[in-house]
Amino acid sequence: MPYPGPTLREVHVDAILTQMSIAYIQSQADFIADKFAPMVPVNKQSDRYFVYNKADWFRDEAQERGPSTESAGSGYDLDNTPTYYAPVYAIHHDVDDQIAANADTPLKPYEDGQLFVTQRLLLKRERLWTSRFFNTGIWGKDMLGVTSGPVGNQFLQWDQATSTPIQDIHNQKAFLLENTGFEPNTLVLGYRTFHKVINNPSVLDRIKYTQRAVVSADLLAGLFGVDRVLIGKATVNTAIHGAAPVFSLVHGANALLAYVAPNPGIRIPSAAYTFAWTGLLGAGAFANRIKRFRMEWITSDRIEGEMAFDMKVVGSDLGVFFSGAVSNTP
């Protein structure tokens, strides 16, 4: 009987692959908080801003003027009480000396730590965005999606076969234009809403003769008559560390139609602004900064990230929120 040669396990010892690893790092394109509202750089953590009284600017008060008489007079009110406050949101990750020295290739503890901290801050900002902007009771008008028989401020959910999302959006565009003088330019869809809208029969019928016949965010913008469609794709795990993960899409099954100023400025109306405290020492354009410093008493380097901002609705009448735009199921 021949003597067996070396086995596969004897001629090869498993080692760490150096050309790949696996980390669930969400793309920054999946986060929309920095894309929705114009960024207003501010030097101080808190301050006031002026709000002109909208009603004063829409009155037709000019009158015919007779010879040697005064012209009709009018005026407008200002409110200087609105304020912003940009708290500092922070998180850190410590890299122990022994961990750094003993890490195998392709691990890069310091680079990994920076990415990890950045992801936590982006997720915090995204969830704050949804709580400030993407919910009921925030905007001048709330619409509620129902499965049948819509009445009043209700509409047929956009994953129902006979629903008409394009018409629903255009109806609310007309409502906002009539009540504010501004035509909405931005539509925000949660990913679940986007996924079901692009499969809506009325939407597919509109695009069946287009060149690609594939519904993209740009194509939807054309159908809805807005400058841009933003799609929120961020995912969050709400379970504590060590527990079974509980994943969910941050933006739910909702939609938001709004007029958002392309750029902030004096006498520029907008549904919302983001006040970024760029006056904070070392802060970047989005009031963010990453620091690395020594923690000798725990023989570690600390990687610390910060963001300082306030996201505010400054024109609630410039937005319509669609709650439950589609059924919240896959």
Image (tube, rainbow, N blue to C red):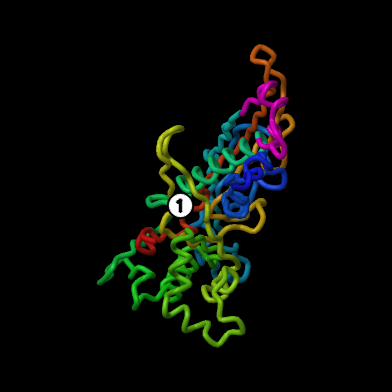
Q: Residue furthest left?
A: 149
The answer to whether 125 is drawn above or below residue 325 in the figure is: above
Residue 141 or 169: which is nearer the viewer? 169
Verify whether residue 103 appears in magenta: yes
The answer to whether 25 is drawn above or below residue 36 in the figure is: above
- Residue 301 is left or right of residue 85, and the answer is right
Residue pictured at 43% horizontal, 80% vertical: 202
Q: Quadrant of residue 86?
A: top right
Element at badge 1?
A: strand
Q: Which residue is mark 1?
A: 249
The answer to whether 295 is drawn above or below residue 34 in the figure is: above
The range drawn in magenta is 93-112
What percent of the width, then of the height, locates residue 275?
61, 42
Q: Residue furthest bottom?
A: 209
What percent of the width, then of the height, locates residue 155?
34, 68
Residue 314 or 325: which is nearer the viewer? 325
What percent of the width, then of the height, locates residue 183?
54, 67
Verify whether residue 326 appears in magenta: no
Q: Is residue 279 visible?
A: no
What percent of the width, then of the height, locates residue 149?
25, 72
Quarter of the figure with the C terminus: bottom left
Q: Is residue 76 visible?
A: yes
Q: Quadrant of residue 277?
A: top right
Amino acid type of the residue that numbered disc 1 sits on in the rendered structure: Leu
Q: Residue furthest top?
A: 297
- Residue 135 is left or right of residue 208, and the answer is left
